[in-house]
Image: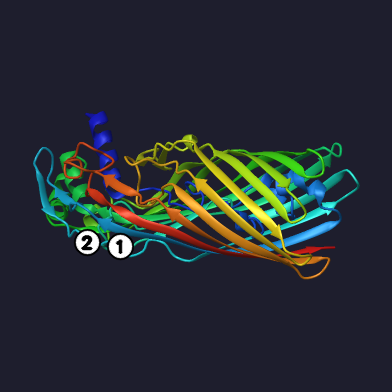
Amino acid sequence: MKRYRTLISAAVSAAVTGFGCGGALASGFALIEQNASGIGNAYAGQAATAQDASTIFFNPAGMTRLPGRQFVLGGHAIRPSADFSNTGSTPAFTLAPPPLPAGAAFPLGGNGGDGGDWAFVPNAYLSWQVNPNWFIGVGLNAPFGLKTDYDTGWVGRFHGLKSELKTINVNPSVAFKLSDAVSLGAGVSYQRGEAELTRATNYSAAAALAIGGGLVPPLAIPAVGAVAGVPTEGVVKVEGDDDQWGFNLGALFSLGSTTRIGITYRSEIKYTLDGSVSFASRPAALAAIVPDGPVTADLKMPASASWSIFHQLNPKWDLLADISWTQWSSVKTVNIVRSNNSQVLESLVLNWSDSWRFSAGANYHHNGEWTFRFGLAYDQTPSNDVDRTPRIPDQDRTWLALGAQYRISKQAALDVGYAYLFVRDPSINLCTGTASVTPTNVGCRGRNALIGNFDSDVNILSAQLRYSF
């Protein structure tokens, strides 16, 4: 009986909490937008170009190609779009105490508006030549991030309203020129992550399950039962943060004066987000059943690796290519746990797979002042059609990009770039059949069947100032 009540208590929590991670601009919630000089090439060949101090992120060994000192400051205005079209969603229901059938239906709701919005992502780098062979540098950037935000009352509100993940990464690095042909680099990453996630919560289902599980004192049953009988909803918010460490490694090989190959690796970073869960518009009768309180959640930032090539075809043209891998298979399930009793409030199953990114680009050196850039990339999603969540309306995307560099002086240069991402329409198919209206599926209990498709794309506009001194 004790074990049964523990399971019911977990089910009540699952009916009112939720956790997820939304999509960003590379696969999953990764951000590849770490400079403006590379966006015009769709970030092809970034581990081999070593064209400015942003190589600290892409391949620290590339600092050996930057004499003296150099400072880079850049920013990206990013506009993802995620418009949902409902193709068969059903409403959420109240739940009568088991084994009685489901009760009244909640309003279905609209399509949620555009879940994307403008965002600004900055980055800055400083490299310094210590002597002919040793170089040091530091980068400040945001390697992971997301934000999706849907209208209150939309059809998918029980699966997600707002999802926001922000990271800040400080990346001191060092490079050593082993010979004219080989350079090595390494760095450490001090990374801070902050997450805020909200969704609608089905208080009626929680009340019914609490009664059915024997979690409600006899004197409180009438008040809790009143909540169970009428569609009653609110908003649950989970927020947390953590600081962790990682590292990155790189090597740069020069094959003569016209060709370079770069390889690089960034380590996994494991967050234990400490924060809180809170419930808005919670009926007083449920205060003890679904209390606010401290929570923790384990979240991994995946490892990644890249292989890049740069080739100077002739004095006018450069060719670039890149293959990158991200270990999204390390992100399978995310659990939110109450800190005071280790109760699992929610288990979000993502079942992501490793993803690959392929890119190619070219530079055209018009004259001593102007360089024009072109790029194409294919970015594979780690998600799948079965487990995809509206917090992460992620699918394969194709990049078309162009950019330009203007050399202001011998010391300074301005880079600008634009990319348009064609996103394959993501489909959503969650809590279908009877799973959303019966107490047999913890992940769907108290939620509705969400069935439909997203119409998605991304626009990115970037600019960067480089100054050598």
Tell me how many marks there are. 2
* Residue lying farthest to the left in this orientation: 100
On the rendered structure, is 223 left or right of 280?
A: left
Image point (55%, 43%), residue name: 358
Contact check, label 2 and label 1, Cβ < 8 Å: yes
| Residue 383 lies in quadrant | top left
Q: Residues within 10 Å of mark 2 (few under 14, many from 20)?
A: some
Residue 244 position, x and y percent, is: 60, 44
- Depth check, front residue: 160 or 399: 399
What percent of the width, then of the height, locates residue 50? Answer: 74, 50
User: What's the distance in space between the residues labelled 2 and 1, CA to CA?
Assistant: 8 Å
> Looking at the rendering, which quadrant does residue 163 occupy?
bottom left
Amino acid tagged 2: Gly
For this rendering, which residue is in front, 158 or 305?
305
**Quick one: SS at disc 2?**
loop
Q: Is residue 203 left or right of residue 264?
A: left
- Residue flagged by tag 1: what amino acid is it? Gly
Which residue has dot 1 on it?
112
Quick one: 19 or 380, which is closer to the camera?
380
Q: Residue 203, image x and y in percent?
A: 23, 53
Q: What residue is pinned by disc 2?
A: 109
Note whether 295 is above or below 223 in the view shown: above
- Which color scheme did the rendering employ for the protein? rainbow
Task: For residue 461, say whether it is visible.
Answer: yes
Q: Residue at x 68, y 45 (%)?
A: 47
From the top left corner, tell me how far across and down residue 400 is, in percent. Answer: 52, 56
- Residue 171 in sight here: no
403, 275: nearer the viewer: 403
Q: Secondary structure at mark 1?
A: loop
**Res. 381 mark:** none
